[in-house]
Amino acid sequence: MSFNNDDSRRGFGNDRKRHFGRTARPTFDEAKFNREHPDDEPASTPERRSFGERAPERRGGIGSQAHLRRDRENFANRPSRFEERPEHRSLKDRPTFDDRRDFNGERRFEDRPAFDNRRATQDNVVPAVGDADAAPQVAVGGIKEVEELLNKSPLQVHRVLFMHKSGNPKLYELQKLAKRAHVHVQQVDSKILDSYARPNHGVVALMNEKELLNWMDVREEFFKARDTGEKKLIAVATNIEDPRNLGACIRSSLALGVDILLLPAKGMCGITPSVARTSAGALEKLRICRPDNLEGAIGELKMAGYQILGLDADTETNLAGFDFADHVVLAVGGEDVGLPPFIKKQCDAVLRIPMKPEAHSYNASVALSLGLYEYARLRIKA
């Protein structure tokens, strides 16, 4: 029984052994070797020697005494590598940068100024200076420390950061306490917590520079003002994330006669050191309140007879010449998002500040200042 397949023809069978990809070894040409090595002994098949018998000395071949003697003579008579080099010159005698010449003998770099190897001193360097206004908020880390703050001074806590998926039941209970105190909570990575405070045990509280007021403690004052006829001006700032912008809003509110400034519980920057610095002392003089429910607080003021006004570019009602009431709530939003919908739906009127079409929007603090000025220019006597 025979097998006639491709493997046997290609040499993969057991009966054939071929070396694919290999070239044949070149044969030894004795005549050519003798022509190229005339001083050596003609190549021949080496004779067999008995054990211990020395091989006869080759006549002039490689490794022979004649070959070693020729190598010694060639080494002694070799030309020196340093004879063709120019005489060694010191660094002082070498040509300068401007004296170098090209292959045609002409000087190179004639118009280039001489190289100045002086290093830059401290007088020539402007050191990098950190932003002094970007000081971080005061951060308090630790379960017991944060729990004490939430129990005693919840309105001084801006927000509480918890470690994401910590699995610690104490942190879950602390998170429930923060929500009952209407303090904004956020789940973050442990590296972010370590960047604020160490050790932190998985929780960090970011503090305000000033403890804010509780709406339940001050609302009766504004409700009674409607009955007594006392004029009241309330400002509302929402969606402001820039501390300098919020500091400017606080400063303008104090200057233009705002009785109280309302801030939301979340979605805002805290009262940071940058806010305090930008306010230029107005932070300590202006009353700032953070209602647990800002929408509910505005709704109560609306029911009490306050005129709810908002500042936004998406309206046709002009701020200039608007007829203000004696009791006004004036709200402003961030530059990018504007007024929140829950405030806009409660507004009696949304006012537009005159603006060139080339401009995108006003800064939030500038818009609030213009709106407050329009209300206060007849109220505040020079």
Image: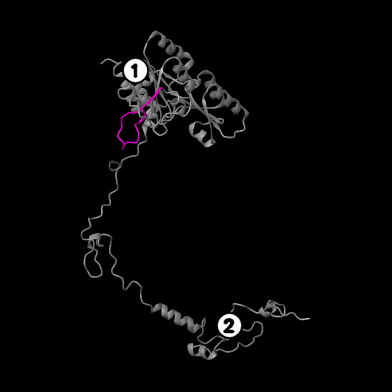
Q: Quadrant of the N terminus?
A: bottom right
Amino acid type shown at disc 1:
Gly
Q: Quadrant of the C terminus?
A: top left
Question: Can residue 219 be seen from the camera position used here?
Answer: yes
Q: Measuring 56% from the left and 31% from the top, which residue is drawn there?
A: 202
From the image, tell me which residue sits under label 2: 25
Report which quarter residue 105 is drawn in.
bottom left
Secondary structure type for disc 2: loop
Residue 350 is one of the magenta-drawn residues: yes
In this rendering, position of residue 102 left or right of residue 179: left
- The residue lying toward the viewer, choosing from 301 and 294, is 301
From the image, tell me which residue sits under label 1: 257
Amino acid type shown at disc 2:
Arg
Q: Residues within 10 Å of mark 1 (few under 14, many from 20)?
A: some
- Rendered view: 29 above or below 191: below
Q: Measuring 56% from the left and 87% from the top, which residue is drawn there?
A: 28
